[in-house]
Each structure stands twice: as structure tokens, then as C-alpha cells.
Image (spheres, coloured by chain):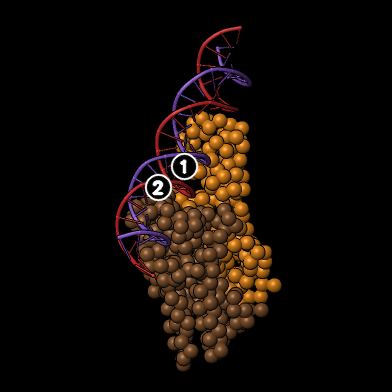
Chain colours: A orange, B brown, C red, D purple
Amino acid sequence: MEPFTPRQNAVLECALQLLVAGGERALTTAGLARAANCSKESLYKWFGDRDGLLAAMITYQASKVRTPGPRESMPTVDDFTRSLVVFAEDLIGVLSGDVSLALNRLAIGQADRDGAQLGALLREHGRLPIEVRARALLELGRRHGYVHFSDTREAYETLYGLVVHDGHVRMLLGEPPAGLAEDRSRRARLAISQFFRLYGHGALDIE
Amino acid sequence: MEPFTPRQNAVLECALQLLVAGGERALTTAGLARAANCSKESLYKWFGDRDGLLAAMITYQASKVRTPGPRESMPTVDDFTRSLVVFAEDLIGVLSGDVSLALNRLAIGQADRDGAQLGALLREHGRLPIEVRARALLELGRRHGYVHFSDTREAYETLYGLVVHDGHVRMLLGEPPAGLAEDRSRRARLAISQFFRLYGHGALDIE
DNA sequence: GCGGAACCGTACCGTACGGTACATAACCTC
DNA sequence: GAGGTTATGTACCGTACGGTACGGTTCCGC
């Protein structure tokens, strides 16, 4: 269903560029047809209607990102800690990406229509893979005895909160991402340090 | 500047109802005029244009909520803990309110236009008062020796992350708020418990 | 080279909406 | 009660945009 043709992928890529550059208002069918050198009739043939185009943009963008699972080899707690820091940095990087912000704004702006179809799509293809990856990592650490928790979901949500704070909403509201994306590394290490003080063996020196 | 007349307040209240009920698409000037029994000409005279109306809605909504400062009397650490729990519950309640969600969706959906004017307004009148109140509470607790931190902003952001996680964005995306607003009390107490393990007595100040 | 499918470019249609103009009515003030 | 101010309701305009139709062209299979 999702595997679009290369031509359609190119059109979707162009649509993402338009969306990032000018917001939803800039993403008109006529404008996309002009920018992508295709006809409006093809757009409607391929994607059905405008909402189908928006949904296709989300699935296309999701198809571009890979979510590597954790390596099963995790000999030391330092390896585990480093994996968590890498996850935290990746998470901040993804959330502050311009395409991610544009798609989230799009889905949020339409969350009142169609039963939040785009929002569900974004949660399924965007947030869920990240959560699955992080929870696998956390449970691997638990199996090694590096962290202790009974509810994986709760531990993940705590980790998410420690890493992101309210930075995502602030960026969605248009605040320049200086405060969040800038000192990404320091932010990630602080969050993981705090996470270990809540779920690990007390304070570990990460630096 | 903001103190609107009672008539204008009634119109703005009506506009908020329209926005909550049907999203941004339902908030048209003609529809508002019909619902509020006023004329479009009056709308444009009072608020300038549609963006002015949206801005007025935000400031009007902000004028309805009061942000009580912490009582200076804070004899015991239990009082301080209770105040933190109340703050956390209030925060969850505010963020999951339908008017708040609708206004945040509105501002996020327009964050690409006009230099995110609505987003700035929402941050200034919505989030900033909450942050000021919470930081005053945190510093009061620090003066009493109940918590230790060097950076108030960092402590506040950690508190925010522990309380809200990514629940705000999930609700903005249209997810039913069962997971967040439901067990609000338990969520708040858990977050404050975690906050004390990070910043309470015996906890090491980070960096 | 021929038929058909896919596609491009453009023109077109209907409608919804922001914004303006105007006629009428209520409400003061003197 | 005359004049001015303010508000309502409606009609109107321009435009932007989603969606459709159609003629022309490229490309592929046979």
C-alpha cells in the first residue's frame, strides 16, 4: 500500500519541502503540481484527495527514518549508558527537525477533523517506533541488572519527560529552538544521569 | 488595552465555544456573528481583522485564570510537598482542558505565519504565569531547605517533564486523554516523588 | 507504426470565506 | 425631539482553493 513509485516519492518530497518552507497554507494542490512538475489530475489519481496526500506525506517521511534496535551485546553499564545518551540525543534531534515540526503542526492543526486521522498516523509511524526502540533498550538494561523498574511504560515516559521537558510544544509554538536543540549533548547526558538516579544504582558519573 | 467591554467578552466567549466545538474551520467571521448575534462589521471594528480576533481570544482566556502565588507560610516539608502535588494536578488539569487544547492547536497551526505571533502570545499569557508561579514555589522550598538546586529554570523544566511527559503533545494530536487526565492524582504524586528523589534532601545537586 | 495507458498543462467550476458597504434601528446627550 | 454614536443584519465583492474536464504529448507493448 505505502510503497509509492519513485515519481510519487519525488512529488511527496517536494510536498514536504513546500510544507516546511511555508506551512500548510503554502501546500496547495496547484502549487504542488507546479513545483513538482506534475498535473493536479495525477495528484488526485495517486492520492485520492488532499487528505490522502497529507497522509501519504506522513507515511513517506516515516519510511525514510530507520529505527535500529539495540545491539544485544551490552557488556558493561557504560555501554548501556552510552546507548541511552545516544537515544536521548537522537530523540531531541528528531523532534527539533524541521520536517518533523512541520508534520506535527499539520496533524495538530487538523486534529479536530476526521477523528484526528493524521494524528493517529503520526503516532503510529512517528512516535511508536521510537517508543518501541527505547523500551527494548530499557528492558535489555533491566535484564542486565543495570536499571530496575516494574512498569516499562512508566519508565519510558519518565525518560521521555526528562529528555524533552516541554521543549517539543515550545518549538511547535514557534519558539526558536536555541534552548533545546543547542546544548543537545549536555541535555541528553543530564537527563540520563537523572534517569539513573531514579531507576539505577544511584548517581553515576557520565562524564 | 485588553480590558474588553462585557459585550466583547461575551462575543469572545462565544468564539471560544465555536473553536472548542468545531476547530478552527468552524470559527468563521460570519459564523461567529451569527452565533453571537452581532454584525461582522462590529467584529472588524473591535478586533481589526481575523488575527486580531484570535489574539483577543487568547488574552481573554488568559484573563479568566488566576495564578495564585504560594503562601509564604510553609512550616513543614509536607506542606511544601502538598503544594507541589497541587501544582502538578493543576498543571495536568489546565493542559488537558478543552479550551487550552483548542487554543494551543490554533496557535500551533498558525506558527508558520506572522512570526508565530499567536504562539508568542500563548507562551506569554499561558505558560509564563504557570512557570513564574512554579519557580516561586520551588525557590520558597529551597529557602526552607526542602530542596536543593542551583538552576531554578532547570529544576522547573525537570519538574514539568516529570509531570507532563509527552502527554500534552499526544492530546494535541487528538489522542483521547484517558491516559493522562484520568489518573491525574496518581500521576502528580509519582512525579513529585521522583522530583524529591532528584532534588530533595540528601539528593546531590547536579553539577 | 499503431493503440492505449499514463501523464502534463491549463482552463474551468463551485464554493467558502475574509473583508467592505449600506440601510436600519436602538440609545444616548443636549 | 434633533443629531450623533453605535450596533445589527444583510447584501455584496474579490479571491483563493479543492476538485474536475479536456486536449495534447510522451512512452511502452505488440
Q: Name the residue under label 1.
A: A51
Give how far across and how far down residue B42 sits, in percent.
41, 56
Sequence-first disc among 2 and 1: 1
Q: Which chain's residue wears label 2?
A: A
Label 2 and label 1: CA atoms lie apart by 10 Å
On screen, residue B130 above or below A164: below
Give how far across and how far down residue C2 sits, in percent.
56, 8
Query: In this view of the protein, which residue sits in the foreground, A139 or A89?
Result: A89
Give how far across and how far down residue A127 sits, in percent.
51, 55
Looking at the rendered structure, the kind of residue marked 1 is: Asp
Query: In this view of the protein, which residue sits in the foreground, B124 or B193?
Result: B124
- Would you say the residues marked 2 and 1 are in contact, meaning their CB atoms lie under 8 Å apart? yes
Give how far across and how far down residue B85 sits, in percent.
44, 78
* Residue drawn at 49 percent across, 55 percent down: B49
Q: In which quarter of the image is the C terminus of chain B?
A: bottom right
Q: Mark 2 points at which residue?
A: A114
Other residues around mark 1 within 10 Å, as few (<14) / some (14–19) / many (≥20): few
